[in-house]
Image (cartoon, rainbow, N blue to C red):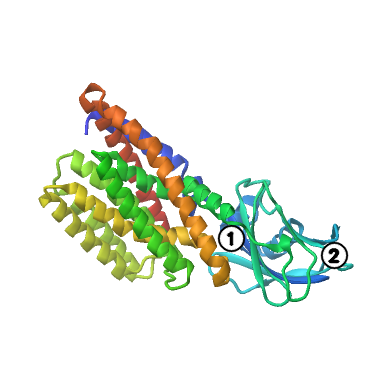
Amino acid sequence: MSRRSARGAAVAVLALVALAPGTARPHGRSLSYSSWTLAPDSASLRLRIPLLELTRLGIDPVGDPGASVRIADVLMRSVRLSSGGEPCAPVGEPRPAPAPEGWALFEWRIRCRSAGPLEITSTLLLDVAPDHLHFARAELPGGEVRERVLTEAEPSWEIGPIASGAATQQAQGTPLRGYLALGIEHILTGYDHLAFLLALLLLAESLREVAALVTGFTVAHSVTLALAALGVLRPDPAAIDALIGFSIALVAAENGWLLGGGGRAVPALAVTGLLALAVLGAAGRGSVPAFALVGLALFVFCHFALLARAERPARLRAAVAFAFGLVHGFGFAGVLSEMDLPRSRLLPALFGFNAGVEIGQLGVVALVWPLLSALERVREGSLHRLAAEVGSAAICGFGLFLFLTRTLS
């Protein structure tokens, strides 16, 4: 790498570190979930929100002994039910309940003055995070379940009159086009997934190679997205987030290794670092088990050894895209898995969401690949090489930051 490239890479890495508090959040979306059991004139509610999201409101959910009271007040004011256009009143204060690690869970009951058309509204976090998504799940009388994604553009869900044993037309859940849009937004705001995709594209030499990389990544993450959303596999989310960071760093480091003509320094440094993290993992530090880190070290060693002998590295890179696509699919599935939808609602949601992810992904490829191809034709490819060197170094720094912070958190 030239001195100019190195300076550019350093600037890019510093910029990413400066932006780290915003980009380190997994998949870039602000999310919360509510589960409603509705009756004609009342409801019971369970609401979950990540502790990290509460810090946006200036609440310290861990160190502040009075945090529960402040959280309950925010939730009660932000997530509301109305009947016949009149606000329904909480029965007592929201009560904290046992929650998964990293989450706050509150429960409360709501009473309406009279029976009428019901409407659920959420303005939770919209003043500080306009892209916040609130997933409302409603169980109607008779046990039928519907869901709706509430956003800044559509913060209310008009359920309508509740008839025993039947769902009203208004109570229908988010349509297919809604999940299609959600999938597109998810990939376009998922900085870690976009970084991985860009790292793959930087050294692609032909449209055929791009197609192989994207196809491998797509097929793989579609499989694990479906398995996780359907509840067949439920890996640890913290470990998955860390491995996504690792995948970004490895592919970007591989780019630099290929551009630099190979050598032992990059593989040795990667293997040594992973084994050091494995020692910390064996001592109980971090979210990734020690044996998994040792496995990653072995994978890195074998991968670079095969890459050094490969006459056509593109095939091996396509295989890596598929392998890490399996990991990224679990990351995509987090949005749908948390909603706990019945199978009849989950299947269309899964189809629409996955189709949206693919459309967004293809849109990114359609934008980036022509630009890289144009650079290849300028100054005998020197600008493309410079972009690949600087881009790979910056993406590697970003991936390392994600991997280390997520592994050691």
Rendered location of residue 110, percent (x, y): 79, 69
From the viewer's side, name the closer residue of 47 and 87. Answer: 87
Image quarter for residue 236?
bottom left
From the viewer's side, name the closer residue of 343 and 308. Answer: 343
In the picture, the quarter occupied by the C terminus is bottom left
Question: Label 2 is placed on what type of residue?
Answer: Gly
In the picture, the quarter occupied by the N terminus is top left
**Residue at image point 28% right, 36% down:** 388
Mark 2, residues whose alpha carbon is within 10 Å: few (<14), some, or many (≥20)?
some
3D distance between C-alphas at marks 1 and 2: 35 Å
From the viewer's side, name the closer residue of 185 and 258. Answer: 185
Viewed as shown, does residue 144 lie left or right of 341?
right
Name the residue carrying label 2.
116
Question: Label 1 is placed on what type of residue?
Answer: Leu
* Local secondary structure at mark 1: helix
**Residue occupying the far right of the picture:** 113
Name the residue carrying label 1.
51
Rendered location of residue 242, percent (x, y): 39, 58
Q: Which mark is residue 138?
A: none
**Residue at image point 20% right, 53% down:** 316
Rendered location of residue 30, percent (x, y): 57, 53
N-term-proximal mark, 1 vs 2: 1
Mark 1, residues whose alpha carbon is within 10 Å: few (<14), some, or many (≥20)?
some
From this view, report whether residue 221 is shown above or below residue 37.
above
Rendered location of residue 170, percent (x, y): 73, 60
* Nearer to us: label 1 or label 2: 2
Image quarter for residue 72?
bottom right
